[in-house]
Amino acid sequence: MRETSSSYSPLVHGVAVVLTLSVFPLIWVGGLVTTYDAGMAVPDWPGTYGYNLFLYPPETWLSGPFDLFVEHSHRLLGALAGFLSIGLVAAAWRYDTRPWFRTWTVWVLIAVIVQGILGGLRVRMDARTLAMIHGCTGPLFFAIATSTAVMSSRLWIERTALSPQSASWVPKLASIMVVASYLQLIVGAQMRHVIGLTSHRVFMGFVHTHLTLAAMVAGLAIALLFGASMFTSAPRPIARPTTILALLVLVQIGLGLGTWIVNYALPWSEITEGLARYTISAKGYWESLIVTAHMATGSLIISVSTMVSLRSWRLASVQGIREGAWLWKKQLA
């Protein structure tokens, strides 16, 4: 399907970018809800203690218990994402000339509605399993919002080509990176929502799988960073996010180690004086910050991986089209 520069709308792209940016604090606060076990701080839904969500007295939740603050804030941020999704649909159907993209924005709106319903059912049914599903679909919506921002960008519509050497394997690696990072997040969610009945063998199975996927993600990040250096005609759209991705993976490894320490300490703490004196404090400030940051950074890795994947596939497909046109002209000559 042919797309021209007339399809590009700064308004549509701007709304898509703002929507994507709004999802990250939504995921972060949602992580705090899980960290502080605040999912039932507000026992009713869609209202808040009988009030309309938007009319709940600010002084009550701003200066009230912290679990109430994070739960109600999470709901408000979710509503913001919903309103932005509605605005995206309206802007796309008014200013974007691509029928498929208009339909895509409708699916984005449906996705955020489904995510909100999952969160509501988690409260109404008081089900931790739904909390885990809700936590896993949040990063998935983050990836969807990121995809929307990429597909509404000038880069996507104007279709700049990349070097033929990179077109063959960088998009494939980037796609594998998206899948691997998401699978790692799912396994991490299993560990985060583990219940007391879970056996030690099952839990350690989750741990080993999580570590294996972490090694895979780190290797893919390094490979993508190397592959980005091969881009010649469009270096910045690919090279910059792959550099950010590699840095995020490095930070995530450190946060993962910190998360293990604040949750379980280390088996060799008796030979490390500093760790030997460390006492695990459930829901302590720094402990909660590290654990939540680990979860949120995992979502950020999925988002940036999605950006790299879509951009590289788009640029590679354009290169293929240009090469095919060149060969066709050569045969005709």
Image: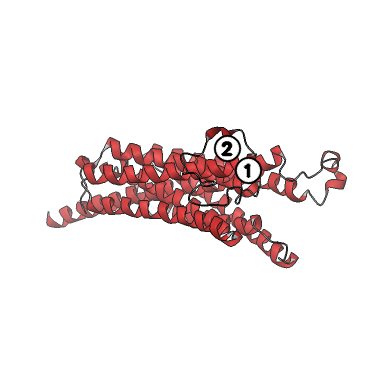
* Residue shown at 69% from the left, 47% from the top: 259
Q: Answer left or right for 274 relative to 27.
A: right
Disc 2 packing (10 Å; few <14; some 14–19; many ≥20):
some
Residue 332 location, x and y as percent? 12, 56
Q: Dot 1: few (<14), some (14–19), or many (≥20) neighbours within 10 Å?
A: many
The disc at residue 146 is: none
Q: Nearer the viewer, residue 75 or 193?
A: 75
Can residue 246 be seen from the camera position used here? no
**17 or 254, which is in the foreground?**
17
x and y percent of residue 194 in the render? 67, 59
- Circle 1 — which element? helix
In this rendered view, identify the residue nearer to me: 43 or 36: 43
Q: Which mark is residue 61?
A: 2
Provide the residue designation for mark 1.
67
State the quadrant of the C terminus: bottom left
Residue drawn at x 40%, y 41% is 19
Seen as rendered, the residue at the extreme left is 333
Which of discs 2 and 1 lies nearer the camera? The answer is: 2
In the figure, residue 213 lies in which quadrant? bottom right
**Sequence order check, earlier mark of 2 and 1:** 2
Q: Amino acid at mark 1?
A: Asp
Q: Tell me the amino acid under the disc marked 2.
A: Trp
Q: Is residue 179 something that shows in the picture? A: yes
Pick out the residue farthest to the front: 50
Badge 2 element: helix
Whole-angstrom CA distance, mark 2 to mark 1, is 9 Å
